[in-house]
Amino acid sequence: MDPLIVFVFSLVLILYLTAYLRIHPFLGLILTSVVVGFLAGESAGTIEAIASGMGKVFSKFAIIIAAGSIIGLILHQTGGARLIASDVMRISRKPLLGLNVLGFIFAVPLMCCILSYVIFIPVAKEIRIKEGVPKVLTASVLVFGTLASYNLVYPSPVVYSAVYDLGINASDILVPGIIIAFIVSVIGYFYAMRFCKTGDVSDFITDNETENENVKVPGRIAAYSPIAVPVGLILADVFTNISLFDILGEPDMALLIGVVMAIFFAYRQYTFNPIREWVEKAIKRSGVVILDMCGGGALGATLAMTGVGQEMGNLLAVLPLPAILVPFLVAVAIQSVQGSRVVTMLVAPSIVIPLVPVLGLPPEIVLFSMVSGTFLISHFNDPFFWIYKDLAELETSEVLRSYTLGGAVMGITSLAFTGVVYLLFY
């Protein structure tokens, strides 16, 4: 069967299974992956592709998600997240904007938009409780901040390899990338404020997991250390050549250190039994998130097996389109198929670079056009889709309205400002 038909059918099927029949996302994703493999005529390699896709996601994110879940739940139960949220609200007159800025600032230094989201989602939950707003709103303003800088600002992994593939000086795209990313982040914030305010607020105003108001709030060292120390270690690994940080600054190791610190400070307030229960509960929750992510990895692997990304890219490259749209749409096609922004920017340049002389665009504009395309179209095969959904405890429809549609708005905004830069400076 034609790869493009398989791709469209897979999206319709997963939407039907998860949104209409309300089958658990993991099962829906695996079933769809099997169907995709058979429709593509690759039945012999389907199970191998599913296992490979799941394995890659699990090896990359399992420790990060589990450790982040433990830190988040302990901070939530001990009152540490409440203290951080209070500080954000006191410093910023607009706490939700402050949350957006937190995600924006830390996504690139952490070299992972997912990690930045995982670290700060406990703070987002506390802010939503204090502000009395829907959980989709606080989750979306945070996630949009992380996506804006991670997709556009050098030396993010999304941008890094393409800069050298296109022969661009990093200094030439650093400042424009920051400016475009900041504008895109603000647009994401306003999108969330306008379109993500729907939802029942009663479920968390009386949330029985929220700590009792009489519980003693920990000191700032106890509240901030489980977050600040891992962030500091990761930044030290990025910006120094000290061999010690090659180990301690790995995100997995850094977050495990954060787990130890969270447990240590909690033990000064509580006995071991409640802490053990919190850790077990956090691990069980993280297991659900990881399974959903692995399902997304399986779908991405089977879709890649069909060759639909290459076919879509080649089709777009020969269409009579404005030059600046071609790199953008090639990236959109690849992103839609396999879900990873980093992979998109590893594959898209190989299709676009031979077309650069024909397009007549400066390499910098080609780059920003492509990375604008990585905002679209994030859906069921994107691991971040499921992390965003499960950690914020959202419905699939809420994720599509906020994460998917909001990302599309941000990507189109990024492309528009790339066009403005091209007209003004080239």
Image: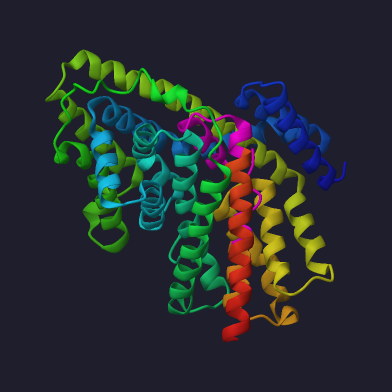
Residue depicted at x 21% and y 37%: 223
Q: How many marks?
A: 0
Residue 153 position, x and y percent, is 46, 65
Q: Is residue 18 above or below residue 88?
A: above
Query: Quick one: which residue is furthest to the top in this view?
Result: 273
Image location of residue 33, percent across then percent down: 70, 32
Q: In which quarter of the image is residue 379?
A: top right
Residue at (36, 17) in percent of width and height? 208
Residue 2 sits above or below residue 288 on the image? below
Q: Measuring 68% from the left and 49% from the top, which residue is drawn there?
A: 336
Q: Magenta stretch: give its range.
A: 372-399
Q: Is residue 250 above or below residue 216?
A: below
Q: Where is residue 190 in the image (x, y as percent from the top left)?
A: 52, 53
Outermost residue, left side: 268
Colouring of the image: rainbow
Q: Which one is nearer the viewer's eye here, 229 or 253? A: 229
Quadrant of the image containing the C terminus: bottom right
**Residue drawn 66% across the image and 21% down it:** 23
Left or right of 313: which side holds 295? left
Q: In this view, does 119 lie to the left or right of 147?
A: left
Name the foreground residue: 393 vs 367.
393
In percent of width and height, residue 323 lies at 74, 75
Depth check: 125 or 23 in front? 125
Queried whether the magenta region covers residue 394, the answer comes back as yes
Residue 130 position by quadrant? top left
Q: Quadrant of the N terminus?
A: top right
